[in-house]
Image: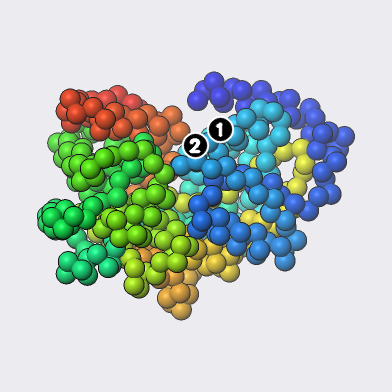
Amino acid sequence: MKAWHGVLTAWLTLFGAFSGPAGPGAAYAQSPSLDVLHWWTSASERRAADQLSVLLAPAGVQWVDAAIPGGGGMAAVKVLKSRVLMGDPPDVAQLIGSTLTEWADVGLVLPLNAVAARQKWPQALFPTVLGLVSYKGDVIAAPLGIHRINTLLYNRRLFARLELSPPRSWAEFESVARKFSAAGIKPLAWSDEAWQVATVFESLLLAEAGPALYQQMIVQRKSAAWMDPRVEKALLRLRWLRSLSEAPAERVWTASARELMNDSAAMMIMGDWASGELMAWGASPAIDFACVEVPGTAHMHLYSVDTLAMLVNARHHEALQEKMAETISAMPAQLAYNRIKGSVPVRRDLSAAALLTLGACARDSWETFASPTSARVPSLAHRMAADEATKDAVAQALWRFLSDPRMDAQEAQKRLASVIRSP
């Protein structure tokens, strides 16, 4: 990361020399469009991005799409780095969590302090969200929506067929899994793709360890905490969940969601964006599927927050960038975007009537996040609590544990502890 920081700093020095009126961006100065780089490419994500584009048009902002497919945004981050090094950063980029502060650190992110003041973000936004988009006294991104990672989606039809209730504990989960297996139905949709394995594991870790130990391991990055016996239990449960799939393979998350929709699998552990995808395909939360929190994580919200950063470049579209930030953080866009995406608004001033329009899964997510008695914990797998290198290293360590049956859980704990370092 230090090497990358140095490259960006060098590029910024060069950029400063050419960013005046006669620079390479001068020809674009009058364009009313903004180039937006993101990784929303599934059906629901695409619809949500298109909705933002529609809402921005009356504000005089044209959304020029630069979508980069790839699970978890890894490909998009690589393209963004490449564009920066070529001297052509986009106007807007989907930057979240720790990656956002890294880019702000090298001066590539446009501060949005004026927008935040005009819209009273300190009063309107959840404090946790405002903290995520604030750095060294500046507001550095526009927040879009909050995703709940510790979500268990289940197929209503299959549960009704076997007269089962959704599991609220691991004992209940094991019971329904056995019954589905006996009926010839796959209990759990699964993928061995590394970021998806990490997504499941962090929910299991939260369930077994609780929020206090989770914070020590993920946020404070105390290596010794990873040797706790509760981590071993989470790893063993991860391996057991994988065993519920007859032929585990790496595949995109939408393939697992399709299994849930087509009655091929009874359950799926995935962020609530999967509910948005199911609805985009025509599934009904009242008839076809529903969701509960992952067993053991009641009153806990393992979160990831969608944010868009306005980047500094030679085109000097600051006024348009601020207009975009104002529009997407206002209540109309918040409701329109999150209803499609499966996430919930970042605003705490949501009315009871507006909350009712979000659906049962989203209502529970928003109410849990808003409750002063809930534990709000940041996702490691989705960049909220670790830099890109640490996130990838943890995901790879988990993938190796699942891929090698000879590796015991304690060895995996040692490997995980070795890649976690204090910030």
Q: Position of residue 152 (x, y in %)?
A: 29, 56
Q: Residue furthest right?
A: 22
* Residue 400 x/y as whole percent: 29, 28
Q: Residue 363 vs residue 121: left or right?
A: left
Are the residues tagged 2 and 1 within 8 Å (C-beta)? yes
In the figure, 293 relative to 84: above or below? Answer: below
Is residue 49 among what the camera can see? yes
The local crowd at label 1, few if under 14, some if 14 to 19, many if 20 or more residues have their Cα within 10 Å, is few
- The kind of residue tagged 2 is Met
Quadrant of res 343: bottom left
Report whether residue 152 is seen: no
Instruction: Tell me which residue sits at (64%, 45%) in the image.
Output: 66
Colour setup of the view = rainbow
For the residue pair 406 and 311, the one nearer the viewer reads as 406
Residue drawn at x 45%, y 33% as measured from the top left: 388
Q: Residue at x 33, y 57 (%)?
A: 260
Residue 78: numbered disc: 1
Q: Is residue 255 above or below residue 371?
A: above
Residue 12 drawn above or below residue 214:
above
As measured in the structure, the alpha-carbon distance from the residue carrying label 2 to the one carrying label 1 is 7 Å
Tag of residue 251 = none
In percent of width and height, residue 194 lies at 36, 36
Q: State the image coordinates of residue 167 (x, y, percent, origin top left).
A: 19, 60
Front position in the image: 122 or 278: 278
Image mark count:
2
Which element carries disc 2, helix, strand or loop?
Answer: helix
Which numbered tag is attached to residue 74? 2
State whether residue 238 is above or below residue 374.
above
Q: Residue furthest front?
A: 184
Q: Quadrant of the C terminus?
A: top left
